[in-house]
Amino acid sequence: MAKEKKAPKPKAQTPKGFRDYFGTEVTERAEMLTQIAGVYHRYGFDALESAAVETVEALGKFLPDVDRPNEGVFAWQEDEDDGKGDWLALRYDLTAPLARVYAQHRNDLPLPYRRYAMGPVWRNEKPGPGRYRQFYQCDADTVGAASVAADAEICAMLADCLETVGIPRGDYIVRVNNRKVLNGVLESMGLNDDGQRDAVLRTIDKFDKVGEAGVRELLGKGRLDASGAYIDGVGLSDGQAEPVIAFLTSKGETAAQTIENLKAAVGDSAIGAEGVAELEQIADLLAAGGYGPDRIEIDPSVVRGLGYYTGPVFEAELTFDIIDEKGRKRQFGSVAGGGRYDDLVKRFTGQAVPATGVSIGVDRLLAALREKGRIGSQSHGPVVVTVMDRDRMGDYQAMVAELRNAGIRAEVYLGNPKNFGNQLKYADKRESPVAVIEGGDEKANGMVQIKDLILGAKIAESASLEEWQDRPNQFEVPRDQLVAKVREILESYA
């Protein structure tokens, strides 16, 4: 009789496009989320935690660059007897769920409704370097406020968030534009074909990469890219393309100059003029609040990709240089964006409900802070109370309880205590700053040994015998001075 084949062992590997986060990374993110939540709360926004799963119908077709609602998301169909169960999907952002929540609970919510939300989102897209299928977002939105004062407030709050988490003034800029201005430019061009309009929008979005000359070529016959491949153009004449160029190059030395240039760019378009007026009002409101062009500026080159934006759009860009994986110097780029989306809730209610909001890319912001050395410094693990006698576990638990009650992170070694060297190896692996030792002799004399592991590691790396003698890294203190001595050592490395 043939032997029954054993089932193959599963591979212990993270699925493609996902990653695991450990200790310090999780702590740093939690601290950043707390800081951002503090700013949101100070501005009067309330927390909301919505479901991670929505119906595909509720999510809609607003995911970038996809045509079908269940493309680009992780979706599945509910099992029903008739085979017609709902399609469900993991949320791809935090805005679409907000539209559903507001439509569902609008009779119980204040108007305007100001909420913030933080959590993971999932996108079933092709992963790449730094591009994951699961990532964190940190959003704040105002639903039910038609005034652009709500948009100006979001921009101010975004600037405050960046400074609160450690991005100083001068290392970031919040750039503001208005989709109505862009629509006015397209209207003045006489473009009625949706495909052509979309092609123009995609071309405008490349302005920061290819510049004015590159945009001219792409709006016309096309151009050769850096790799030598030919990219077909939109096919516009020079006259048709001119309003786009005027729009993209309308940024002046001041907000007032930019506004005047935009008025010329939109020509006789009523929707374009409305957008310019809104930008002018936003600039005035921000100036009144003390947010100058060193923090927030009107910039016509900002084009947000999502189709549901209907008015002001904004983007936070970090302006400092970093060195990429090929050794080239480049700017870090965008870490947050948002805008006005007055039609999103209408899908559920049939009535237009104005809304505006921002989403901060937490993982990118954390990466930026690491690049600048503002987080990611050496972190320490818990103080380790070693076990010299397993029959005296109660004594060690009493020690660790005292340390914890004093606000000191601590743990008792819970492995096999037979080999004391292994306990210290464990403490090293945990990056513990201090080890506590109480053997039988120390117990009898009412003393305890405190070992400074940080100094011990430094001495082991490069110190001579004299330095060992001059700088002891182990101290014997009375048992009742345990907490005080541990705190003294920890504060010396704070």
Image (cartoon, rainbow, N blue to C red):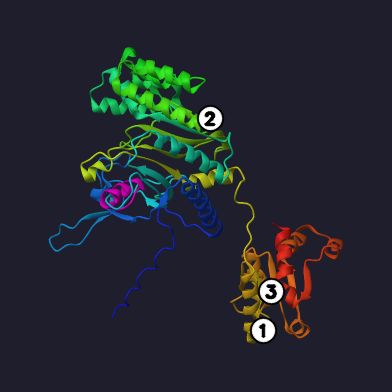
Is there a contact, CB below 8 Å, between mark 3 and mark 2? no
What segment is highlighted magenta in the picture? 89-105
Instruction: Name the residue beneath numbered marker 1.
Output: 389
Label 1: which secondary element: loop
The three-letter amino acid code for the residue at tag 3 is Gly
Q: In x, y percent, where is residue 60? A: 26, 45
Q: Which mark is residue 292?
A: 2
The residue that appears at 86% across and 65% down in the rendered structure is 469
Q: Is residue 265 above or below residue 19?
A: above
Residue at the farthest left position: 82
Q: Main secondary structure of the magenta part?
A: helix
At label 2, the amino acid type is: Gly
Mark 3 or 2: in front is 2
Neighbor class of circle 3 (other Cα within 10 Å; few <14, some 14-19, many 20+) is: few
Of the numbered discs in the image, which one, if any, rests on residue 156? Answer: none
Numbered label attached to residue 421:
3
Pointer 3 and pointer 1: residues touching (CB < 8 Å)?
no
Q: CA distance from mark 3 to mark 2?
A: 60 Å
Residue 38 vs residue 461: left or right? Answer: left
